[in-house]
Image (spheres, rainbow, N blue to C red):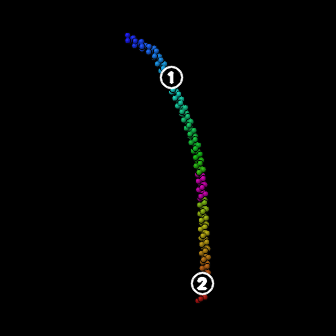
C-alpha cells in the first residue's frame, strides 16, 4: 500500500504541480526575455547618449582649439610688432649715440684746432720776441 500512496501522490503532483511549474517556467522565461530586451534597449540608449556626448565634447574641444589658435596668432603678431618697435627704437638710440659721439669728436677736434691755433700764434710771438732779443 505505501507504493500506491506514493504513486497517488506522484500522480497528484504531476497533475496539479507540474503544469503550474511548466507555466511558471514559461512565465520566468518570458520575463527573462523582457528584462534582457529592456537591458539591451537601455544599453542602446546609453551608447547613443555616449556617442552624442562625445560628439558634443569633440565639437567644444574643436571650438576651444580654434579660439586658442586665434589668440595665439594674435599674441604672435603682437610680439612681432613689439619686437619690431623695440628693434627700431634700439636702432634709433644707436644712431643718436653715434651722432652724439660724432658731435663730441668734432667738438674735440675743433677745440684741439683752436688750441693749436692759439699755441701757434703764441709760438710765433715767442719766436718774434726771441728774435728781437737776440
Distance of label 1 from label 2 (alpha carbons): 140 Å
The rendered magenta stretch, by its main secondary structure, is classed as: helix
Q: Residue furthest bottom?
A: 134
**Circle nearer the N terminus (1, 2):** 1
Residue 117 higher or lower than 31, as above or below: below
Select label 1 or label 2 by which is in front: 1
> Which residue sits at x=57%, y=38%?
56
Q: Position of residue 102 (x, y in %)?
A: 60, 68
Q: Are marks 1 and 2 in contact (CB under 8 Å)?
A: no
Mark 2 is surrounded, within 10 Å at the Cα level, by few (under 14), some (14 to 19) or many (20 or more) other residues, namely few
Mark 1 is surrounded, within 10 Å at the Cα level, by few (under 14), some (14 to 19) or many (20 or more) other residues, namely few
Q: Which residue is mark 1?
A: 30
Magenta run includes residue 84: yes
Is 107 displayed left or right of 21 in the figure? right
> Which residue sits at x=58%, y=49%?
72
Q: Which residues are magenta?
A: 76-87
Q: Nearer the viewer, residue 6 or 48?
A: 6
Quadrant of the rendering where the N terminus is positioned: top left
Q: Position of residue 124 (x, y in %)?
A: 61, 83
Residue 120 higher or lower than 63, as above or below: below
Q: Which residue is mark 2?
A: 126
Q: Nearer the viewer, residue 38 or 124?
A: 38
Q: Quadrant of residue 90?
A: bottom right
Mark 2 secondary-structure assignment: helix
> Which residue sits at x=55%, y=32%?
45
In the rendered picture of this protein, how many numbered marks are placed on residues? 2
Q: Nearer the viewer, residue 12 or 46?
A: 12
Amino acid at each position: 500500500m505505501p507504493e500506491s500512496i506514493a504513486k497517488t501522490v506522484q500522480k497528484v503532483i504531476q497533475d496539479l504541480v507540474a503544469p503550474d511549474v511548466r507555466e511558471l517556467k514559461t512565465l520566468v522565461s518570458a520575463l527573462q526575455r523582457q528584462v534582457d530586451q529592456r537591458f539591451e534597449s537601455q544599453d542602446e540608449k546609453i551608447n547613443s547618449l555616449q556617442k552624442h556626448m562625445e560628439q558634443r565634447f569633440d565639437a567644444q574641444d574643436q571650438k576651444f582649439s580654434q579660439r586658442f589658435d586665434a589668440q595665439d596668432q594674435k599674441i604672435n603678431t603682437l610680439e612681432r610688432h613689439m619686437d619690431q618697435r623695440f628693434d627700431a627704437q634700439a636702432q634709433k638710440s644707436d644712431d643718436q649715440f653715434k651722432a652724439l659721439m660724432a658731435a663730441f669728436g668734432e667738438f674735440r677736434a675743433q677745440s684741439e684746432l683752436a688750441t693749436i691755433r692759439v699755441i701757434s700764434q703764441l709760438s710765433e710771438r715767442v719766436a718774434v720776441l726771441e728774435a728781437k732779443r737776440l
